């Protein structure tokens, strides 16, 4: 019975047992000794400590968790080797989770936090530039749009995360070279920050002017979940394309997931620190059902594309969002998502999955940028670190980094009335070429049911898929 | 794509604040929306009823293109005069004394009508997106699907609808805005928008002369330290090229965007030519390689002779592994053994010395290698000086493709730092998982033996070879040394050698040669995929991973003393590489049978 397995909710993962093994540097060993560990041993030890700590956090034994955190802090370091860095961010996330049990404390500690938009932009830029994933997505997206827009004279593109002008500059260039001539192009960009959109408008208009393409950029300053569909102004006769890069998962966030997490496991486990809120929730039978399915859903092997039966947690927000777009009948909708299972119901589930996938991402950075690089540090801290924190520390509607595997997205889009548009061979060829341009053997991509998975070594990290309305 | 994005992007990053200011100052009232150079661009002031939602009760009318385009649909049967409206015809009929009837205005609401576009491919051909009025559908049809008969004499712009043309003619040429940069605008708002950006750009380009911004260069400069440094510098090469093509040709296809990396690959190859001359190495390897795998597969006992021969010269610690000169020298088997040797016994030497030596070798290697290649073609297999050079070369080459950081560390970055990248986090996690699930070392030992055993029985099957060889070798490396690309190279060289396929060049030199080969092998995805499959390391399929990790664990546990020994050294990260590469390595002199005997301890 799933619930009996307690808070170590993913016993199927061998990593779980790792945390219960006693490693040679015993927990009680004096700290100076720890510092002499070799990189590999330290890494293993850190994993061990992290899992131990997470177990304590999940079960709410804060004394132990604190002890573990103290040990980790002796070894982890945001500018050390990969595992040290990962450990640093995971412990921060775990600590944040603990702190959230005292909202006053948590708020107070974060009260003076400032987020610099320019820094965030820079970080995303570095991520875009240094790792090939988003570029592959861009190549595939643009190619899918080009193919869908063939012969169209009025093209309207809705960019749900209008932060990266490079993508559309590339598209403008290809459009200008179209045999049938460039179309009238309108890009509607959705983003939370007006500055970002202004930049976008500026860059794109400039290029469009040079290329002599009739072009219009319509900015919509809005959070995705609050997007007013009327503002998109989809007009008669124009061919519509939608591009979503790493956006849709945030729409999975909802408070009602607490409904289905009232079992002893849940309240003891991932909800240990949210007891008051969790207890307010009624215990529906639907919730129990879902819970069991969630248990099945978890796939122990990080790489397996999972043969276990899938089940979807319904998400009202995403459903209505997809429905609204279905009504606009886009000719193509290209979706890029993190291909990880970070939307598990329990803390341990998510932590294990996140450990694997962020280890991979950190490895990518390790192979690409020097350890001293400030940019790398920022990407790790402000992008990956924040994501990790969100995955580990947050619950309910706060938890927006709900990355899900491709097969889930396929199901969701299918349910919403979209049919898959297989990505073309030509697009994949270009993407593959681009990947190889990185000169590093680690990056791979493979096709799966007309969609593309981009991986580091054999771990898929991002998925790209194209869709249109099924008649 | 890569090119254009990297060009635009860094600029973007650094510019933002300046530009925002500019925009606020000069363009304070301008909306971020700017429609440019598009007089015919649709206005969106007035929203017509949404096309997707016509009144469901409306009568749907489908007219043929002919009817739709007919200027005077209502023809008088007497004089053939045509009228646009039926009412007018009726009035006209009155003049002929024909019966006529004017429609009376009805008090009740007239039945709503919607019209379909006759063009079957048009979205408005679908009743659900019909247009609400006849004039609208007429104009739509001519604009979208009709001939543009009306041409403006001044600017040669063409229009399908006369009224559009008239509206344009009225203003064409009367208002013209010319920016200092030479761009012409017919609309004031586009002009103003342009001016704001144009000035901003002029100022900025005065500050940052060429196309690379500081962000970009610092990024890329930093990036060049690591394994993919070259791949990144390719990005640097890309953008200016892309920009210029944008400026001058005003066209570049996606293909070219991707393709520009081809040019870069060429540039990169060139870059390497003077460092390593990788293409020639790749090809000469390929020619000499075909029999290598079988050597490797043969049992170690068969190699006594060749091994002894090989160990005559202590300096050639890498011969067996990398040098496949002539078919009668069974070096590769010995190589594998010798390879294990310094590793397990771990008698270490001065790290820095061996490093600099390797780097020197690296720089001088092409010549020596060529000599050697010649030697092998002429069959002069065991010439000492040849071997010496080959040994160095291969040591260097290996070091190059695996421990790239060392190459780059010469370029001003900390060698120690680059080299200290041990096991990747992914591999650590998998190892941890493995340790969590494996309780007994015996089982993993078994898997080690199994992989050795089966690899010798699958000489003819490159695929399995690919998975098994890495697993065994990977175990050796995986525990202590674990530079991924290093491993990968070795594995690849064996694996693809066994396959005897042309990917060898690609595999043997890791990412570097891969870029050169890419241009050639691009279309051949199968080969590529095979290569990818072969070069599995850290992440592998379950089986591979398990072997890899299990073996690693065994080796680690067996060489416990060894790791202690290592802990006394100062540079924790480097001894493995150095022990591999060191030429004065005493252990390398031990005959390989012994070293395999050391391996025999496994059993």
Image: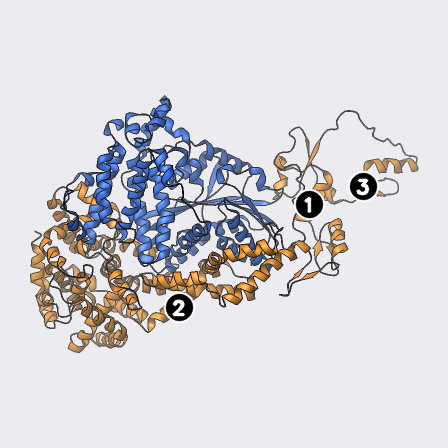
Q: Nearer the viewer, residue B434 or A119?
A: A119
Q: Secondary structure at mark 2?
A: helix
Pair 2/1: label in front? 2
Picture coordinates of residue A381 (x, y %)?
Answer: 35, 49
**Residue under pointer 2:** B266
Residues marked 2 and 3, same chain: yes
Q: Which residue is mark 3?
A: B84
Instruction: Give the residue number, with chain letter if any, for mark 1.
Output: B141
Of the chain colours in the picture, the one used for chain A is blue
Q: Nearer the viewer, residue A119 or A347?
A: A119
Q: If you read the primary sequence from the N terminus, does the residue marked by circle 2 or circle 3 appear first? A: 3
Q: Tag 3: Cα neighbours inside 10 Å, few (<14), some, or many (≥20)? A: few
Q: x%, y% of residue B167?
A: 75, 51
Q: Which scheme is used to colour this image of the protein?
A: by chain
Q: Is residue B345 left or right of residue A364?
A: left
Judged left or right of residue B331, residue A10 is: right
Determine the residue positioned at 88% across, 40% down: B78
Asked if one can make out residue A11 in the rendered structure from this viewpoint, the answer is no
């Amino acid at each position: 019975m799933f619930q009996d397995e307690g808070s170590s909710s993913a016993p199927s993962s061998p990593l779980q047992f790792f945390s219960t093994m006693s490693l040679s540097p015993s927990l009680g060993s004096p700290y100076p000794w720890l510092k002499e560990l070799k990189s590999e041993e330290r890494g293993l030890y850190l994993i061990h400590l992290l899992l131990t700590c997470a177990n304590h956090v999940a079960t709410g034994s804060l004394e132990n968790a604190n002890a573990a955190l103290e040990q980790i802090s002796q070894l982890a370091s945001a500018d050390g080797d990969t595992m040290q860095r990962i450990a640093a961010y995971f412990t921060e996330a775990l600590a944040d989770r603990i702190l959230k049990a005292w909202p006053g404390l948590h708020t107070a500690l974060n009260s003076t936090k400032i987020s610099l938009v320019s820094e965030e932009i820079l970080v995303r830029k570095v991520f875009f530039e240094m790792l090939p994933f988003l570029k592959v997505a861009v190549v595939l997206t643009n190619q899918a749009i080009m193919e869908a827009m063939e012969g169209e004279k009025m093209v309207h593109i809705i960019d749900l995360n209008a932060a990266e002008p490079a993508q559309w500059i590339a598209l403008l260039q290809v459009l200008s070279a179209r045999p049938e001539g460039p179309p009238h192009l309108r890009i509607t960009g959705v983003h939370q920050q007006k500055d970002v959109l202004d930049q976008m408008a500026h860059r794109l208009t400039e290029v469009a002017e040079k290329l002599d393409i009739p072009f219009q950029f319509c900015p919509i300053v809005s959070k995705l979940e609050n997007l007013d569909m009327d503002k998109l102004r989809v007009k008669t006769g124009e061919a519509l394309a939608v591009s979503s890069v790493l956006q849709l998962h945030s729409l999975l966030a909802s408070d009602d997931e607490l409904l289905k997490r009232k079992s002893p496991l849940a309240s003891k486990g991932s909800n240990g620190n949210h007891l008051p809120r969790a207890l307010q929730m009624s215990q529906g039978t639907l919730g129990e059902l879902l819970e069991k399915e969630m248990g099945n859903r978890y796939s122990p092997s990080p790489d397996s594309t999972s043969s276990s039966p899938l089940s979807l947690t319904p998400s009202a927000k995403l459903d209505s969002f997809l429905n609204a777009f279905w009504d606009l009948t886009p000719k193509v909708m290209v979706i890029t998502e993190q291909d990880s299972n970070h939307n598990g119901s329990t803390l341990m589930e998510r932590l294990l999955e996140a450990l694997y996938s962020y280890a991979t991402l950190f490895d990518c950075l390790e192979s690409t940028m020097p350890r001293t690089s400030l940019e790398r540090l920022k990407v790790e801290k402000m992008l990956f670190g924040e994501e990790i924190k969100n995955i580990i520390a947050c619950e309910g509607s706060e938890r927006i980094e709900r990355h899900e595997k491709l097969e889930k997205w396929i199901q969701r889009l299918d349910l919403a009335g979209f049919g898959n548009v297989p990505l073309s061979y030509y697009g994949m060829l270009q993407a593959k070429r681009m990947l190889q341009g990185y000169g590093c053997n680690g990056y791979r991509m493979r096709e799966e049911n007309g969609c593309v998975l981009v991986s580091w070594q054999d771990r898929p990290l991002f998925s790209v898929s194209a869709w249109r309305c099924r008649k | 794509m890569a090119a254009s994005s990297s060009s635009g992007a860094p600029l973007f990053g650094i510019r933002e604040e300046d530009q925002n200011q500019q925009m606020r100052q000069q363009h304070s009232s301008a909306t971020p929306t700017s429609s440019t150079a598009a007089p015919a661009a649709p206005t969106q002031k007035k929203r017509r009823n949404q096309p997707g939602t016509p009144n469901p009760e409306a009568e749907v009318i489908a007219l043929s293109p002919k009817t739709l385009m007919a200027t005077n649909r209502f023809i008088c049967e007497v004089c053939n005069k045509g009228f646009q409206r039926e009412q007018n015809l009726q009035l006209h009929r009155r003049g002929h004394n024909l019966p006529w009837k004017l429609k009376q205005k009805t008090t009740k609401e007239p039945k709503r009508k919607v019209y379909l576009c006759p063009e079957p491919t048009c979205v408005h051909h679908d009743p659900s997106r019909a247009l609400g009025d006849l004039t609208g559908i007429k104009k739509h049809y001519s604009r979208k699907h009709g001939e543009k008969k009306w041409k403006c004499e001044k600017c040669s712009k063409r229009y399908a609808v006369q009224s559009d043309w008239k509206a344009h003619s009225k203003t064409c040429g009367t208002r013209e805005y010319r920016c200092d940069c030479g761009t012409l605008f017919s609309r004031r708002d586009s002009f103003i928008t342009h001016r704001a950006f144009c000035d901003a750009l002029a100022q900025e380009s005065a500050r940052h002369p060429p196309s690379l911004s500081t962000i970009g260069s610092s990024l890329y400069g930093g990036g060049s330290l690591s394994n993919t440094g070259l791949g990144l510098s390719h990005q640097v090469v890309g953008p200016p090229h892309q920009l210029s093509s944008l400026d001058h040709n005003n066209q570049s296809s996606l293909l070219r965007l991707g393709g520009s990396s081809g040019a870069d690959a060429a540039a990169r190859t060139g870059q390497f030519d003077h460092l390593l001359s990788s293409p020639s190495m790749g090809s000469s390897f390929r020619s000499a390689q075909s029999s290598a795998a079988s050597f490797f597969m043969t049992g170690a006992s068969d190699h006594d002779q060749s091994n002894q021969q090989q160990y005559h010269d202590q300096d050639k610690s890498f011969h067996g592994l990398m040098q496949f000169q002539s078919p009668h020298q069974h070096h590769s088997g010995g190589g594998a053994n010798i390879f294990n040797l310094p590793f397990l016994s771990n008698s270490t030497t001065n790290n820095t010395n061996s490093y600099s030596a390797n780097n020197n070798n690296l720089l001088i290697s092409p010549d020596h290698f060529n000599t050697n290649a010649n030697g092998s073609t002429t069959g002069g297999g065991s010439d000492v000086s040849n071997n010496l050079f080959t040994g160095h070369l291969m040591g260097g080459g290996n070091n190059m493709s695996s421990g790239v950081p060392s190459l780059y560390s010469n370029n001003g970055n900390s060698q120690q730092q680059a080299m200290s990248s041990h096991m990747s986090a992914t591999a650590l996690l998998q190892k941890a998982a493995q340790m969590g699930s494996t309780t007994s070392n015996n089982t993993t030992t078994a898997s080690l033996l199994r992989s050795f055993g089966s690899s010798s029985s699958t000489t003819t099957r490159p695929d399995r070879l690919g998975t098994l060889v890495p697993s065994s070798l990977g175990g050796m490396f995986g525990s202590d040394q674990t530079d991924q690309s290093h491993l990968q190279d070795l594995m690849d060289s064996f694996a693809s050698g066994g396959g005897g396929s042309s990917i060898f060049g690609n595999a043997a030199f890791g990412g570097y040669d891969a870029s050169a080969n890419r241009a050639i092998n691009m279309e051949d995805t199968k080969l590529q995929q095979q290569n990818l499959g072969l070069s599995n390391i850290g992440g592998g399929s379950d089986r591979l991973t398990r072997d890899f990790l299990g073996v690693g664990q065994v080796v680690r546990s067996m060489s416990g003393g060894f790791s202690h020994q290592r802990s006394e050294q100062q540079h924790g990260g480097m001894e493995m590489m150095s022990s591999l590469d060191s030429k004065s390595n005493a252990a390398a002199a031990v005959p390989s049978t012994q070293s395999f005997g050391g391996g025999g301890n496994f059993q």
